[in-house]
Each structure stands twice: as C-alpha cells, then as structure tokens.
Amino acid sequence: MSSTQSGTDGAPVVRMRGIVKRFGDTAVLDGIDLDVARGEVVTLIGPSGAGKSTLLRCINGLERVSEGSIEVGGQPLRYDEKHLNQLRARIGMVFQAFNLFPHMTVRDNIAVAQRDVLGRSRGDAAQRAQDLLERVGLAHKIDAYPDSLSGGQQQRVAIARALAMDPTVMLFDEPTSALDPELVGEVLGVMRDLASEGMTMVVVTHEMRFARQAADRVVLLADGGIAEQGPPAQVLQRPTSERGRAFLRELE
Ligand code: ADP
Ligand code: MG
C-alpha cells in the first residue's frame, strides 16, 4: 500500500479526461475521468464487457480514443509510431495470456527488449534479468524455456519482463484469469509485493482479495462510466450506487 493515497504529491502518472471510446456506434467508454497518482494502486472491476480492457488499452495507445485526452507521465498521448514506441517503453503491460517468446530462455525473454529498446549491454540486461527473477522467486529458472514452466511461473516471468523496462506504471489485465486456482496465489503475491514497494499499478481483476489487500482505490466500471470509486472497504462493502450494489450481489 502506498503512502500517496491522496494523490496530491506531484502530477498524476496517468490522467484521463472525458474519454469516449466508440466501436461503430456503440460508446464502450462514455466520458471517463481518471487520475492515477504516483505509487497508487488502482483496481478496476466491473461486469464482463464493461470496457475494462478497452480502458487499459487506451492508456498504452493500443486503442485510440474517440474523444478526450490522456497524459502519461505528464506527456499528452500522441498516436504517431515514434511516440507510441516511447510510451510503450515506459508502460509495463501484463495480459491474461502469458505471451512469452517460446523459442527464448527466460533470461532472453527478460533481456531482449532491454537490449533492443533501451540499448543496454548484454551483460547489464542479463544481470537485471537475474535480479528481477530473484525478486519473483524464479532465479533457478533463468535458463529454462517457457513451456517447461507452470502458468503461474510463466506469469511471474512476464511480470519480471515488464519490470525490466523500468516502467512508470504497470497495467495488468486479468493476470490470473487463465491460471489453475492453485497457481493464482503466487502471482497475486508478486503483485502485492510490487504494490507495497510503491509501484504505480492499474489492475483489472476479479480477485477481490487482491483489491482488499493491495488496492488504494477500487474503481467500478459499468455502462461506459465510473459507477463508483473509493477505498476498497467502501466500494466492496458499502457501495453507495445501485450499480455497485448489483455488482456485489453478483459476486456473492
Ligand atoms: P471488459 O474487459 O470489461 O470485459 P472490453 O473492454 O473487452 O470489456 O469490451 C467492452 C465492449 O467493447 C464489449 O462489448 C466488446 O465486445 C467491445 N469491443 C472491445 N474491443 C472491440 C473491438 N476491437 N471492436 C469492436 N468491439 C469491441
Ligand atoms: Mg477484459
């Protein structure tokens, strides 16, 4: 849990104003204002199809907004290739699917973008891979190939790979949804550690225990808008909106 819950120390890492995202005639996001402060952990919840993934994809420019403005690290998001590449180098993204390169060792999975995008030397990139693998409890797997790892281990490597780029913010889109239940805890544990170390994170998840234990703020997305937001204890236990109460009933 961060010490910046008020979000008052400096400019927000992510600032979204009046975000509208349409697919055809349908506004999936319909006027979203959202700030994420440095060190803040925001958990994004809501029913399937609410636009949670779309919102994350707008932050790293994988989706282009129809209206509104986004700033990341104080820089307005621009959609030319040069700026998108610079933006994505600063944003760590972890998806439901592990997306590791199957033909590379764990070390090379973590090192390749450090060398190609950040220009780090082979030795520096490998050392950083080693350090991050220790952090996620997988130093002994540095020479392994992804298909020899469990889903939980692969996802921890994917997190290490994202961290290797020294991101200003980490985006997680249902990182444990594809895992067997017994493997969920190890991934949430790594994410909780990151949160407590002060990483700025936006996490889409159905894991309410993560939201309760690690989030500074829970944001409930429904019907294209933010139906409710606040500290986990408020949103998850005493929702004030009808949408919030309905969502919680469905979880039970
Ligand atoms: P969530 O992650 O909350 O389940 P999504 O952001 O994936 O929701 O999707 C929100 C809505 O937008 C859904 O109705 C989905 O079908 C639609 N949608 C998402 N991506 C596209 C796309 N590329 N083209 C058309 N519709 C899309
Ligand atoms: Mg989704």
Image (cartoon, rainbow, N blue to C red):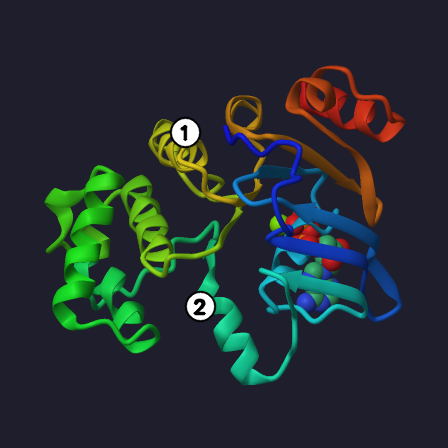
Location of residue 42 (image quadrant): top right
Q: Is residue 146 left or right of residue 97?
A: left
Q: Is residue 237 above or below residue 125?
A: above
Residue wearing tag 1:
181
Give the crowd class for mark 2: few <14, some 14-19, many >=20 residues within 10 Å. some
Q: Amino acid at mark 1?
A: Pro
N-terminal label among 1 and 2: 2
Position above or below: 45 against 234: below
Badge 1, how many Cα within 10 Å: few under 14, some, many 20+? few
Q: Position of residue 80 (x, y in %)?
A: 61, 84
Q: Kindly state the secondary structure of the residue where label 1 is placed.
A: helix
Residue 161: x and y in percent read 32, 56
Residue 89 disc label = 2
Which residue does the image show at 79% across and 21% down from the upper left?
239
Res. 49 visible in picture: no
Separation of disc 1 and disc 2 at Cα?
Answer: 32 Å
Residue 113 location, quadrant: bottom left
Q: Residue furthest front?
A: 9
